[in-house]
Image: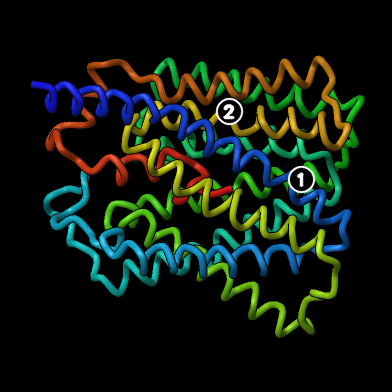
Amino acid sequence: MNHRWTWRVWSLILVGMGPALCLWSAACFGAMAIFGKLAYDAGVSPGALLLVRFTLAAVLLGLVLLVRPGLRRTEPGPYRGEPGNRPSATRGRVLTTAIGLGAIGYATQASLFFSALQLMDASLLSLILYTYPVLVTVAAVLLGRDRLTPGRGAALVAASGGTLLVLIGAGGVSFHPLGALLAFASALTYTGYILVADTVVHRLPPVLLAALVMAGAAGTLGARALFTGGVDLDFEAPGWFWLACIAVVSTVVAMLTFFAGLKRTGPSTAAILSTFEPVVTTALAALILGESLTPVQLAGGALVLSSVAVLQLRPTRTRRRDHAPPPAADPEAQGAQDGAGHPAAVS
């Protein structure tokens, strides 16, 4: 009886850790723009930042897979939600798509993001980027992968209005039209990345998928460095410290804690908790960088974040229909498309 009670208490503790792990992951991702600004101040170029980030993250994730070989195993059978008459993709095609996600999609998205970060405040950039959940929903509806419900329509209106308030409310922040354009292009690229990732995310273990994406992005950025004369790595120790923070804290730790939290909370809760990410960015930008948002922009940001939460809150009836069968579907595979950022959707 004592052993049974101890196990029950321990299970409750593990489940209770889920939201905390998701929030910790969002905080790690939210700190990335701040680390990027500090790296720029230390003399790091965007090219060096991207190359070191993805290379180091790929190496670290590779080491995780070596230490934990169980993370490389894929569950047998077709992924959840795949039509029975749809032919399964070959292993080679799935791996090629995963590497291509990093080599094309993620490398492009990150390049746009950190280019925008050179021109505008981290807080404003984070709010513009976080329009991507709504963009994904719109694209999914247009492609016939999802349907437009009244709740999603309301979320779309709220997000559109919130984005408009964020952009027109620029007063106390360093608003740059080109920076805003790059930020929105980053969100659009992120949207395409997630839609493509949705075709392979159920066929590969999440950590393996993340490692392949990182390796693909590192390969593209390494090739670009070779063709453009290389990147300047001759900067002082503070620059390397902030790069290590981006790769370790805002990439590897953020991904692994997200997966750990996702297993305990489920995809919808994990996605809602991920809206904490731009809140962390805005708070850290104010505390560390001295940035500030106008009241109009804060109201717009609140609308954007609320729309993301509404998108994840589906009626119980719909949620049950979408999730069955089978009842024991892999929660990691479910959430990889919902968690943005992370790793099927990574900041």
- Among the 4 quarters of the image, the one containing residue 283: top right
71 left or right, relative to 273: left
- Whole-percent x, y for residue 78 in the image: 17, 54
| Place of residue 117 in the rendered image (x, y in percent of width and height, measured from the top left) | 79, 48
Q: Which amino acid does label 1 sit on?
A: Leu
Residue at 47 percent across and 29 percent down: it is 20
The colour scheme of the drawn protein is rainbow
State the image coordinates of residue 309 (x, y, percent, origin top left). Answer: 49, 22
- Label of residue 181 in the image: 1
Q: In this view, does 218 lie above or below 255?
A: below
Can residue 189 be seen here? The reply is no
**What is the CA distance from the residue labelled 2 to the residue labelled 1?**
24 Å
Q: Is mark 1 on a helix, strand or loop?
A: helix
Q: What element carries label 2?
A: helix
Disc number at residue 135? none
Q: Which of 215 and 238 is in front in this view?
A: 238
User: Looking at the image, which is closer to me, 70 or 323?
Assistant: 70
Q: Quarter of the image for the N terminus: give it.
A: top left
Q: Which residue is drawn at 23% across and 59% down?
A: 74
Q: Is residue 115 left or right of residue 55?
A: right
In front of the other: 180 or 341: 341
- The answer to whether mark 2 and mark 1 are in CB contact below 8 A is no
Mark 2 = which residue? 276
Question: In the displayed image of the protein, which residue is found farthest to the front?
Answer: 2
What residue do we see at 32% from left, 66% from top? 94
**Marks 2 and 1, the one that precedes in the sequence:** 1
Query: Amino acid under label 2?
Result: Phe
